[in-house]
Image (cartoon, grey):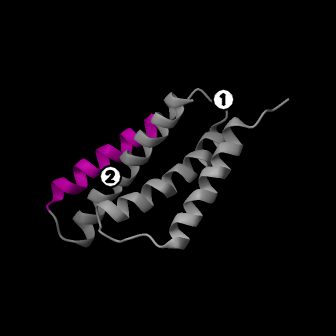
Amino acid sequence: MLLSIFIFIVAGLAEIGGGYLVWLWLRESKPMWYGIVGSIILIVYGIIPTLQSFPSFGRVYAAYGGVFIILAVLWGWVIDKKTPDLYDWTGAVVCVIGVSIMLWAPRG
């Protein structure tokens, strides 16, 4: 379980970090190398979820979506200095509950 969570977190940081670098390049006129490095990180992000042990692509990506939401809220708070409000945190908690149900519910 800890390895699965770790892989989700690494994938989320790769997606958010890569996307952020591309954003900075295109929206905030940063040098082109931001976009190149961001794009490479996004390619690596596409590979990381395949390291999960879950057999279902759809279930892995759906669960990852919930983890991504939490990481995006934290990224906005730490990197962009945008303090999440009660609704941001409430939504993130709902996502964690949903992810937990999807991944670790007993199935017959």
Residue 28 on image: x %, y % = 21, 71
- Residue shown at 51%/57% (left/top)? 69
Label 1 crowding class (10 Å Cα cut-off): few <14, some 14-19, many 20+? few
- Residue 84 within the segment the image draws in magenta: no
Looking at the rendering, the stretch of residues picked out in magenta corresponds to: 31-48
Q: Quadrant of the N terminus?
A: top right
Looking at the image, residue 35 lies above or below residue 83: above
The label number, if any, that marks residue 55 in the structure image: 1
Residue position for label 2: 17
Q: Is residue 67 left or right of residue 12?
A: right
- Residue 36 within the segment the image draws in magenta: yes
Looking at the image, residue 97 lies above or below residue 22: above
- Residue shown at 57%/52% (left/top)? 66
Q: Is residue 49 left or right of residue 103?
A: left
Q: Quadrant of the C terminus?
A: top right
Task: Please state which of residues 55 and 96 is positioned toward the viewer in this rendering.
Answer: 96
- Residue shown at 67%/51% (left/top)? 98
The answer to whether marks 1 and 2 mark residues whose Cβ atoms lie closer than 8 Å is: no
User: What's under tag 1, amino acid-wise?
Assistant: Pro
Residue 6 on image: x %, y % = 45, 35
Looking at the image, residue 27 lies above or below residue 16: below
